[in-house]
């Protein structure tokens, strides 16, 4: 009997030890997970990771430092050409387009006066990074490379890429041709909004048939290794949906990568990187963004602020201001929503304000760091004093104030002592 009791006690003790050990392992796992959430070490000179939908920066390193872009310039070239040209249009390549590129730089052997379609040219540009194709698209879009460069810079301003200046459509080195990681992320974010661009990115291989100058089929293949499994299966990622490579001696290696998982799309830009690190660094940033951030959906319920409405120095009512539309933001997995703060910048509210009117902006911060901005609109209006009453008050008040002022002046002068005047008369 004692033996059974002894064994029962040992079993209970063993059970308690197993539970304690399991809890200890769970705590260690949670601590390890939190450690894993630290940003990766990126060797590129400049780098950025942003959410494509919100524009929120999830990681950055020297993101506003100006660097040479090399061939990732062609994303901007593609954007302008797509916006201006019909894919079925044809391009006739000029002597300047074909022969003005550097010897040994990327090309697909286009000849002077050769004719291909815009769609074929776009594939040559984005899959093979062909420099003469970039020139041909520029001339077709704007009439000349010089005019195209001007158009590029105008569009850059519209996008908000204010630290970028382009002087050619291909990215071959020029001291006046530069960008930043942040600006390239903005350019990429704008470009991937175009469905035609994304469809080109789906074509990992492509053929340009015989032309008026070529008797051979041109075989094209995507050069971005994360998109083309045949180039390097160890680097390939199924979630990568778009990207562009770049290299010059001055720029070193540059890379833009767009990846999508479920409803999230991330953009990674690396500038001035070594070849051995550029894909591993990109993959680290993508994993960091997808695995270590969670979505917070902000709605009008999360932010409401009351502002007074003033007319003629009278408070006549109040307006409740909220977010114009729902907004997604991202916070680290170990953070909670209390880390999110709202700061509004609104214009003075007038008496005729109505529900739905835009009255300013709401900036959203995470632990003091700006992450997003959305328009602020009126959610509800409560006028406590009707406008007619305000006008009546003002109409009545002005005459009353004048009368009170005149009475005050009358009493002031009538009751004013005349002592000094009497003394003066006596002295005479």
Image (cartoon, rainbow, N blue to C red):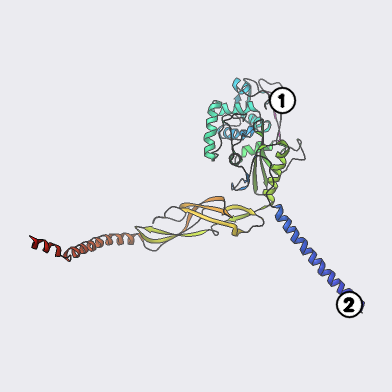
- Residue range of the region highlighted in magenta in the rendering: 204-214
Q: Position of residue 39 (x, y in %)?
A: 67, 49
Residue labelled with disc 2: 5
Residue farthest to the bottom, as pictured = 1
Crowd around label 2: few <14 · some 14–19 · many ≥20 (10 Å): few
Res 388 → quadrant? bottom left
User: CA–CA distance between discs 1 and 2?
Assistant: 87 Å
Looking at the image, is mark 1 or mark 2 earlier in the sequence? 2
Q: Residue at x 51, y 55 (%)?
A: 343
The x and y percentages for residue 365 are 56, 53
The numbered disc on residue 418 is none
What is the crowding at mark 1: few (fewer than 14 residues within 10 Å), some, or many (at least 20)?
Answer: few
Can residue 202 be seen in the rendering of this structure?
A: yes
Whether residue 415 is situated above or below residue 123 in the rendered picture: below
Query: Could you say which quadrant of the image residue 136 lies in?
Result: top right
Asked if residue 325 shows in the view, the reply is no
Relative height, residue 46 to residue 29 (above, below): above
Q: Is the residue 316 above or below the residue 175 in the image?
A: below
Which residue is pictured at 54% across the width and 50% down the height? 373
Is 222 displayed left or right of 323 in the figure?
A: right
Coordinates of residue 185 in the picture (x, y in percent):
61, 41
Query: To which residue does mark 1 refer?
Result: 217
């Amino acid at each position: 009997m004692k033996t059974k009791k002894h064994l029962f006690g040992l079993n209970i003790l063993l059970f308690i030890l197993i539970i304690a050990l399991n809890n200890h392992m769970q705590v260690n796992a949670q601590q390890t997970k939190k450690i894993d959430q630290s940003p990766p070490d990126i060797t590129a000179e400049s780098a950025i990771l942003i959410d494509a939908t919100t524009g929120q920066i999830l990681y950055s390193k020297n993101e506003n430092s100006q660097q040479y872009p090399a061939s990732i310039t062609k994303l901007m070239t593609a954007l302008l050409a797509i916006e201006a040209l019909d894919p079925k249009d044809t391009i006739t390549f000029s002597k300047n387009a074909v022969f003005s590129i550097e010897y040994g730089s990327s090309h697909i052997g286009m000849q002077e006066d050769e004719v291909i379609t815009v769609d074929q040219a776009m594939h040559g540009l984005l899959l093979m990074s062909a420099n003469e194709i970039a020139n041909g698209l520029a001339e077709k879009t704007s009439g000349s490379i010089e005019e195209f460069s001007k158009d590029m810079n105008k569009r850059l301003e519209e996008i908000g890429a204010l630290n970028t200046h382009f002087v050619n459509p291909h990215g071959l080195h020029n001291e006046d041709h530069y960008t930043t990681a942040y600006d390239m992320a903005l350019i990429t974010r704008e470009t991937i909004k175009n469905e035609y661009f994304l469809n080109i990115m789906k074509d990992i291989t492509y053929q340009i048939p015989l032309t008026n100058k070529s008797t051979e089929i041109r075989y094209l293949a995507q050069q971005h290794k994360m998109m083309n499994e045949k180039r390097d299966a160890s680097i390939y990622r199924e979630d990568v949906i778009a990207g562009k490579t770049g290299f010059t001696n001055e720029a070193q290696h540059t890379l833009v990568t767009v990846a999508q998982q479920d409803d999230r799309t991330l953009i990674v830009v690396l500038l001035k990187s070594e070849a051995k690190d550029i894909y591993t660094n990109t993959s680290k940033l993508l994993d960091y963004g997808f695995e270590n951030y969670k979505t917070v959906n902000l709605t009008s319920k999360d932010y409401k602020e009351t502002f007074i409405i003033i007319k003629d120095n009278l408070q006549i009512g109040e307006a409740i201001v909220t977010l114009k539309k729902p907004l997604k933001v991202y916070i680290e997995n170990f953070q909670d929503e209390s880390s999110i703060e709202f700061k509004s910048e609104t214009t003075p509210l007038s008496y005729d304000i109505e529900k739905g009117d835009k009255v300013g902006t709401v900036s959203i911060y995470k632990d003091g760091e700006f992450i997003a901005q959305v328009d602020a609109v009126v959610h509800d209006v409560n006028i406590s004093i009707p406008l007619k009453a305000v006008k009546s008050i003002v109409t009545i008040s002005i005459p009353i104030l004048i009368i009170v002022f005149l009475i005050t002046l009358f009493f002031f002068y009538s009751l004013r002592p005349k002592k000094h005047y009497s003394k003066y008369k006596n002295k005479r």
